[in-house]
Amino acid sequence: MDNPDRIAKLFSSCKENGRAAFVGYVCACDPDFETSLEVCRNLLDNGVDLLELGVPFSDPLADGLTNQLAAQRALEAGCTQNDVFRLVEEIRKFSDAPIVFYTYYNLVFSQGVRSYVERAHKAGVDGFLTLDLPPEEAEELVSASQDLEMKNIFIVAPTTPKSRIPVITEFASGFIYYVSREGVTGARDDLAGDLEERVETIREHTELPVVVGFGISNADHVREVAKSADGVVVGSVLVNCISRNLGDPKLTVSAIGNKAAELAEGLVVK
């Protein structure tokens, strides 16, 4: 399972098969370590191609209520940085799927940037989506990541000026994450109407895959986004499967697997 560029391999495979990649988000250790491990296993068994693993943080500014509560549950269960790395190590025993940490810079900086990157690499992490770190201030993290062939994913938002997109893509690797809605994470009833145009604008500045997230909540949304994007990110709807079944780990795991399979139906061949 030693592949230094699992992300590139995934998107290449999806392109060859004429479909978008399914990126699934859950918070590590929500609601506890053992259930979280089985949640991750079931997601990967039911259509998720790339696991976006949230690192629990006490002040998750980019997250809506659903994901805030997920982080709170994990922290209240006693989740530490060691547990997050251990979770990845356990996943690597049964899966070679790409894993990206969805995190905040304080969690990286406080451990020592290079030390953190080295530890993540050793555990089996493929890259970082560091929500509150602009590319202009990311040199230390990008440099440390490049030395170990790890990726740094940066966000383009609806409010991002076109002139800024080349700055973002210059520092990015792995893929570009386009946030389809302003504000924080959370399921929505509809999609942005200018999605295809926005994705094409990003593609004018990079050859990296472009994935789209924030607000995608059903298979129809997945199907629509997959027409123009290289990957579809789903988070809050999956996390809701955990929050609605607290106290019943078997039901939690079953529910999230069923939801992933349902969403994956939207990944039709283009």
Image (cartoon, rainbow, N blue to C red):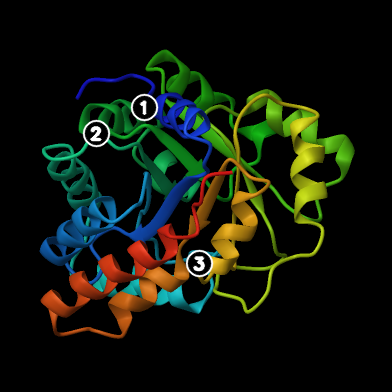
Residue 223 percent coordinates (x, y): 57, 59
Determine whether the residue tagged by mark 2 lies in a helix, strand or loop: loop
Q: Amino acid at mark 1?
A: Arg
Gap in angstroms between the C-alphas marked 2 and 3: 25 Å
**Marks 2 and 3, the one that precedes in the sequence:** 2
Foreground disc of the pair 2, 3: 3
Identity of the residue drawn at 74% across and 44% down:
199
Left or right: residue 203 compared with residue 33: right
Disc 1 on helix, strand or loop? helix
Front-most of residues 139 and 92: 92
Q: Residues within 10 Å of mark 1 (few under 14, many from 20)?
A: many
Q: Position of residue 173 (x, y in %)?
A: 56, 27
Mark seen at residue 6: 1
Q: Which residue is mark 3?
A: 219
* Tags 2 and 1 touching, CB below 8 Å: yes
Q: Quadrant of the N terminus?
A: top left
The type of residue carrying mark 3 is: Ala
Q: In the shown orientation, is residue 121 left or right of residue 230?
A: left
